[in-house]
Image (cartoon, grey):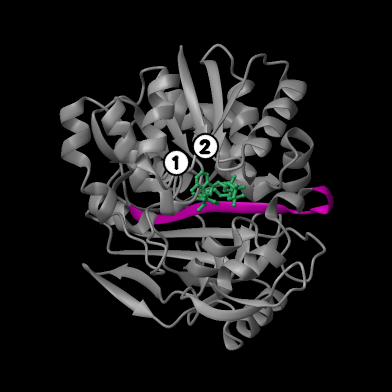
């Protein structure tokens, strides 16, 4: 039905590439393009071996440069570009899509490199241009953002007349047997977690100190885990699209060992995102040179690569939405919709751990929704603006089945 171009060859892109190749009647042609072509070649070979798909194309592109992207898009002519590089590249890729007439999908909202701050305004500013060009841009189509927003849309469509309280709860109860590692790109992950917390209450944003608010929440098949209130991007669009929401928050679990390492990283300045000058010895031993280093980028280079965590990863993730509001019958109800994903099962299928899996599968389904004509709407849209039903149906078929609990104690 259509040609897909995946940008990026990291953990999430690896899962998405396996999943698009598992659906050859929808994705009739696949290209993987990233900064390091050798990684794309290896990924294409692995996917072909695992799925039997033939003829995956690869290319090198630096997605920081619109002209390089435009040249690639013009030569390959994809129907949809799936951006699984880093949030820094969102705007350049959207710009290139506009210049070449391609549709767009991503899993994380734009973030400038020199400021640890994310919000949708930069991407929403493209709405009119995508609309006029007749192109669809689908924003935030991973798990959170992504499935959590679609869960909310599904709850609003089928169970609630008015959603009043929304708590998105994200638990990783897995163990990768490393002293410290992040589950997706360490630079993006540490920037996110060290920010101030933010939640929506009674029509305004409430700011907290980083990881200031936490409480034990009980996750299905896992049990109680200390969960911390974080700022997370999907809250920004959900409170606009569901104006009956009185309070919306996002919670994520962290173990004490992880938090201790994070504290040390911050205290010793390794989470800094500004450049520092460093006098480095030359590799040939002939002297020294002054180089500029961003400490957090250097830290990324020495931390375990999230892509290598899968082999010994045990346990599972559990991510869902806990909702309270007025049901279709006019009475107050609670509702919990969630998915549990096994790290081991994800690794056996795609070679990646559960966090990459829970992001890459929805990215593929979003592209499938577009190519099958179910999510076509010129403009720039967050995922909850589309019909959740066909997406929810595919989650059950593509490896991320969901469960519902009604009228339970939400603990929140
Ligand atoms: P990785 O670091 O594993 O992979 C990133 C990939 O992007 C690498 O292949 C990298 O290439 C490539 N890349 C980086 N810069 C450029 C560039 N300028 N041009 C072309 N390619 C580039 O990250 P993940 O796979 O863990 O994460 C991918 C995305 O998914 C991130 O945006 C992350 O925020 C998002 N995410 C979303 C989640 C959700 O639920 N919504 C959850 C988890 C992640 P190279 O190898 O050469 O550096």
The spot of residue 182 in percent (x, y) is 65, 62
Residue 205 in which image quadrant: bottom left
The residue under label 1 is: 141
User: Badges 1 and 2: C-beta atoms under 8 Å apart?
Assistant: yes
Check mark 2 vs ligand 1: CB closer than 8 Å? yes or no. yes
Label total for image: 2
Q: Which residues are magenta?
A: 311-325
Looking at the picture, tell me which residue is in the foreground, 247 or 345: 345
Give the Cα separation between the discs numbered 1 and 2: 6 Å
In the displayed orientation, state which residue is furthest to the bottom.
Answer: 267
Q: Residue at 69%, 33% (x, y): give it.
A: 43
Q: Residue at 27%, 63% (x, y): give it.
A: 246
Residue 201 shown in magenta: no
Relative to 234, residue 101 above or below? above
Question: Could you tell which of marks 1 and 2 lies nearer the N-terminus?
Answer: 1
Mark 2 element type: helix
Check mark 1 vs ligand 1: CB closer than 8 Å? yes or no. yes
**Left or right placement of residue 54 versus residue 202 in this view:** right
The residue under label 2 is: 362
The spot of residue 147 in percent (x, y) is 47, 43
């Amino acid at each position: 039905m259509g040609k897909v171009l995946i940008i990026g060859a990291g953990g999430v892109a690896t899962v998405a590439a396996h999943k698009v190749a598992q659906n050859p009647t929808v994705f009739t042609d696949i290209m993987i393009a990233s900064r390091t072509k050798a990684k794309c070649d290896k990924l294409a070979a692995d996917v072909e071996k695992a799925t039997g798909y033939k003829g995956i194309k690869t290319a090198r592109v630096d997605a920081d440069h619109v002209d390089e992207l435009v040249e690639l898009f013009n030569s390959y002519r994809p129907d949809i570009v799936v951006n699984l590089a880093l949030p820094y590249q969102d705007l350049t890729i959207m710009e290139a899509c506009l210049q070449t007439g391609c549709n767009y999908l991503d899993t994380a909202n734009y973030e400038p490199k020199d400021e640890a701050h994310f919000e949708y305004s930069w991407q929403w500013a493209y709405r009119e241009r995508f609309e006029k060009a007749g192109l669809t841009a689908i924003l935030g189509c991973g798990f959170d953002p992504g499935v959590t927003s679609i869960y909310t849309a599904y709850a609003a469509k089928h169970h609630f007349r008015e959603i009043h309280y929304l708590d998105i709860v994200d638990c990783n109860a897995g163990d990768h047997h490393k002293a410290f590692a992040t589950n997706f790109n360490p630079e993006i992950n540490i920037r996110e977690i060290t920010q101030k917390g933010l939640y929506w209450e009674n029509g305004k944003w409430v700011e907290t100190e980083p990881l200031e608010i936490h409480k034990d929440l009980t996750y299905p098949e896992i049990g109680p885990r200390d969960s911390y209130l974080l700022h997370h991007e999907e809250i920004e669009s959900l409170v606009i699209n569901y104006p009956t929401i009185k309070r919306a928050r996002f919670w994520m679990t962290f173990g004490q060992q992880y938090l201790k390492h994070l504290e040390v990283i911050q205290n010793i300045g390794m989470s800094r995102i500004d450049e520092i000058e460093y006098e480095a010895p030359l590799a040939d031993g002939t002297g020294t040179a002054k180089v500029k280093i961003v400490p957090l980028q250097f830290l990324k280079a020495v931390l375990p690569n999230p892509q290598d965590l899968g082999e010994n990863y045990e346990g599972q993730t559990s991510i869902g939405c806990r909702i309270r509001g007025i049901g279709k019958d006019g009475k107050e109800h609670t509702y919990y919709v969630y998915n549990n994903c096994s790290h081991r099962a994800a690794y056996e299928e795609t070679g990646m751990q559960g966090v990459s899996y829970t992001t890459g599968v929805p990215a593929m389904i979003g592209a499938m929704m577009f190519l099958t004509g179910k999510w076509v709407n010129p403009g720039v849209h967050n995922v909850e603006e589309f019909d959740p039903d066909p997406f929810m149906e595919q989650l059950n078929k593509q490896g991320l089945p969901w469960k519902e609990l009604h009228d339970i104690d939400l603990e929140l």
